[in-house]
Each structure stands twice: as C-alpha cells, then as structure tokens.
Image: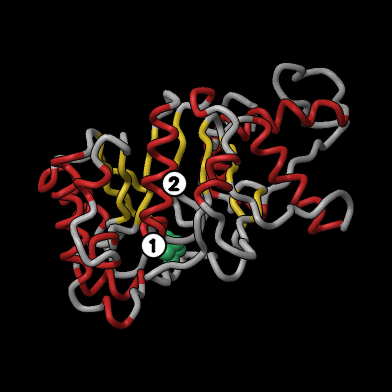
Amino acid sequence: MTFKKSDELREVAKTIPADRLFSETDCPYLTPVPHRGKRNEPSYVNFTTEKLAEIRGLKIEDVERTMALNFFELFGIGEQAKTGTISYKIRNSLYLNLTQRCTADCVFCTRLTKPVVQGYNLKLDREPTAKEVWESIDDPKKYDEVVFCGFGEPTLRLDVIKEVAKKIKDAGGRVRLNTNGHGNVINKRNIIPELSGLIDEISVSLNADSSEAYDDICQPLPMFRNGIYGKIKEFIEEAKKHISEVQASIVTHQRGVDETQCEEIAIKDFGVKYRARRYNIVG
Ligand code: SF4
C-alpha cells in the first residue's frame, strides 16, 4: 500500500470493513516506503499501518485500536473492548453514546449484532444520565467537535442532548448531532428551534431518494412507515432555519437507491452538504 503505484490496492484498503482489518509485513520482502530497497523487518509494519490510517482518514491510534481488537478476536490475546462506553475519541472528535434504541432497523446497521466502531464496543447495559455523559467529557475545547452519535437514535433522549450540549457550548466546544431525522415524530413536536444555539452542525441520514426505498432500507418501526421519509425531508428544511451547518448523508451501495438522485436532493433541492459513506465504514 505504501508503493507509489499501488493506487488500486489503496482503493481496496479504503473499503475493507474495520473488523476485518489486519496489518503485517512480508519480511524480508515487500519493504514499505520509506525503506523500500532494504531488507524488510517486522518493525516496519508501522509504515503500512500509518498509510492505512491516512487512506481511511483516521489517526494511527484509531487503526491500532481496531487492530488490537481484531487481534484479540482472532487469537484471544490482549483485551476485549469493554462495553458501556459513553464517550469515545476518533480522529480528533469526541463521540457521545446516549442510547442503543432506535426507531429504525437499517439493513446495514450492526447496532444489535455487533455495536463496535473503530475498536470501541458501544453496547450499553443502561442508558447514561446527562450527568454521566457530561462527566465523561474531559475538556470539550480539546476536540474539533463533540458529536451526539453512537449506535442508536440520539433524539430519543432529547433532554440529555439539550442539557449536555448547553454545557459543551458554555465550555467553548463545538457540537454536532448525527440523527436519523425522526426527531420531530419521536418527540411529537418541532424540536429544531429547541436545538438552536446548542448544535453547530446537524447530519441527517437521508439514505434514499424515495419513500419506498427508505422504508425498504431503513425499516422504520411500523407506526413510522409510509410517510417518515417526507418527515425527514421536512426535518432537513426546518434544520436549515436554525442550525448553521446541515448535512444530508447516505450509506452507499444499497438496493433500489439512486445515489445520484440522493445527491441532487441534498445539494439542489435542499442546498445542504452531502455525504456518501460506505456501509461498512463507520465513525
Ligand atoms: S438509524 Fe442509525 S442507529 Fe438506527 S438502525 Fe439506522 S443506522 Fe442504526
């Protein structure tokens, strides 16, 4: 992967699911850059891992954590990732894990089967209180952003979001909310004005270009079917009025979803940022 001409290999490395990643040398052969031409040795594996982190837009410690967990799962050596993680750092962002409940059951989501992200196990034995969430944050200013995310829908715990986001803002931090866009239906009111001034950026999972495709891919709870897609679009429109940065996202390679159309909906119809991510690249 470190060789100049290995573009195709780097493309493959970008899309491997995190829980299938491993790094090794082929010493004494295939010496990575910057030692190419010399005899390879195991300690050079770091150059390969560094390149992998760069390709995947991560820090080396993120890849190291993932590989330590994969190593444990493969050989039973080392430590299993502990459950009950409330806050977790990826790159220079801090993510907050409020709940494992959700109003959808997306076909690509491993929330209930393997809630692991970049080497962190997000399984919660119970939902943390606002106090516990706040106390899990050392210093909000240290991070590029603090993100309400996790494997579950954060707006199911709107009061916790509001209380903790206020504290983060008061402490000089930046706040992002990642949501499935069901928040107004969940809370039976327009919650966006309540988030004004507390959330700097909101990322809404659009995930489809039609209501039928959305229901098929995201499998919302029965009472949310036939119409939740329209509510998500309204949620994005409303978010634009109160939150300075709004993004619509999709997970790529899903059956029946026209990704070009999704991009048009986000950029042309809504005038918001658009992000497409691979289904197996989380975080
Ligand atoms: S909305 Fe998010 S947390 Fe809920 S099932 Fe889909 S991917 Fe998982």
Residue 84 percent location from the top left of the image: 66, 56
In this view, which residue lies farthest toward the left? Answer: 269
> Label 2 belongs to which residue?
148
Which residue is depicted at the point 31% across and 43% down?
Answer: 202
The mark found on residue 156 in the picture is 1
Which residue is depicted at the point 55% across and 27% down?
Answer: 139
Classify residue 213 as left or right of residue 28: left
Q: Is residue 5 above or below residue 203?
A: above
Asked if disc 2 is less than 8 Å from ligand 1, the answer is no
Residue 39 percent location from the top left of the image: 87, 22
Classify residue 184 as left or right of residue 104: left
Ligand 1 in which quarter: bottom left
Q: Is residue 118 above or below residue 55?
A: below
Classify residue 85 as left or right of residue 197: right
Sequence-wise, the earlier of marks 1 and 2 is 2
The amino acid on which the numbered mark 1 sits, given as a three-letter code, is Leu
Query: Image quarter for residue 2?
Result: top right
> Which residue is at the front of the view, 203 or 25?
203
Query: Image quarter for residue 3?
Result: top right
Residue 111 percent location from the top left of the image: 53, 65
> Alpha carbon of mark 1 to alpha carbon of mark 2: how far?
12 Å
Query: Image quarter for residue 187?
Result: bottom left
Residue 30 shows in the view: yes
Q: Residues within 10 Å of mark 2 (few under 14, many from 20)?
A: many
The amino acid on which the numbered mark 2 sits, given as a three-letter code, is Phe
